[in-house]
Amino acid sequence: MLVSLKEIASLVDGEIVGDEDIVISGVAGIKEAKEGELTFVANSKYASLMNLTNASAVIVSRDVQNGRRALVRADDPYLAFTKVMELWANGNGEPGPPVGVHPTVVIGRGVKFGKRVSVQAYVVLEDQVEIGDDVIISPQVCVGRKSRIGNETLVYPRVTIREKITIGKRCIIHSGTVIGSDGFGFAPVKGVHHKVPQIGTVIIEDDVEIGANVTIDRATIGKTLIGKGTKIDNLVQIAHNVVIGENSIIVAQVGISGTAVLGKGVTVAGQAGIAGHLTVGDNATVAARAGVTKSVPPNSCVSGFPAKPHEEEKRLKANFRRVPQLIKTVRELERKLRTLEEKTK
């Protein structure tokens, strides 16, 4: 696929410095780029690489004036480069998935298909499943009875969507993910754990992306909810009745316990854990490996275990690193004290 620099600038609302007729054949990182390819610099500390790259053109911020290569100046170079990448992701000349229902698909009673769907080999669609327009369901996916998948959603191989689950529009669900598995609910009686029926549902709103091997448990009663625009990384566990607000980011290996409520725009970094029945306020950040045992206010950042305000945690960590020297000092003072005591006897 060949695109002129002028076309790229138009796509990203950018301004060209140099030859607008340069033809771009692909995109690459600034160190790997070859002649004919486009790259970008989003951080000023990498600006020196502009003089070393072999790329034919570079997307940069508005304040960059000139360089050895042709430039496309944009408000947000990273976002602009992402838009350009989509040209090659969607228009690289390779055929898209076949439209239609593969003959090996198992179709239950009352299943409804939208327009231009692609349901591929060995998919199982149980009774009364509804598939929206332009949905792609990859091989070996199982969709439980009465579940619904919204328009333009992409489901990768070996995803399991249990019964009575709602998936919104333009979602992406990566391989190995299970949506609607039973919540971990047991009632202990005389040392025996009796299973509590999990009869709720999961609602995934529009424009959500869910990574590989994520588990999102169905509610005990009511719903587990993932708000629109939220992005979930790989290997995340979301328990029953959790609510995650719109446009939140949940990074890999996070665990969120039952009935926790996360607000809008929340970021939970890798390997963090959130205890049940807590609230994390809008636009809050939970740092990597933090253990949240109390509710987190909006617009705050917490870290450590138990999680506390990040600035407080940093001070504690700094003091902790001084402990060996403090021990050494105390021992020296004890030695001097003993010496003085001996002299006074």
Image (spheres, rainbow, N blue to C red):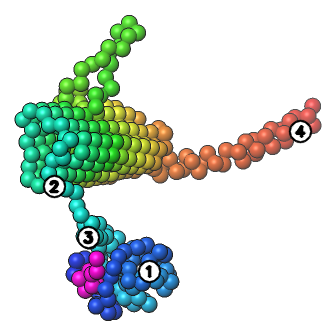
Instruction: Mark 2 or mark 1: name the one nearer the start of the chain.
Output: 1
Label 4 residue SS: helix
Q: Nearer the viewer, mark 1 or mark 4?
A: 1
Instruction: Mark 4 or mark 3: name the one nearer the start of the chain.
Output: 3
Badge 2 is on which residue? Answer: 99
Residue 109 position (above or below residue 132): above
Q: Are dots 2 and 1 in contact, CB under 8 Å? A: no
Amino acid identity at mark 4: Thr
Specify the label residue 339 is tagged with.
4
Residue 81 position (above or below residue 123): below
Residue under the point 32% across and 93% down: 19
Instruction: Mark 4 or mark 2: name the one nearer the start of the chain.
Output: 2
Residue 60 position (above or below residue 306): below
Residue under the point 34% across and 42% down: 176
Q: Nearer the viewer, mark 1 or mark 3?
A: 3
Label 3 residue SS: loop
Q: CA distance from mark 1 to mark 3?
A: 21 Å
- Disc tally is 4
Q: Is residue 4 magenta?
A: yes
The image quadrant of residue 122 is: top left
Badge 1 is on which residue? Answer: 34
Q: Nearer the viewer, mark 2 or mark 1?
A: 2
Instruction: Mark 2 or mark 3: name the one nearer the start of the chain.
Output: 3
Q: Position of residue 34 (x, y in %)?
A: 44, 80
Q: Is residue 19 visible?
A: yes
Residue under the point 9% across and 33% down: 109
Closer to the camera in the image, 332 or 30: 30
Badge 3 is on which residue? Answer: 93
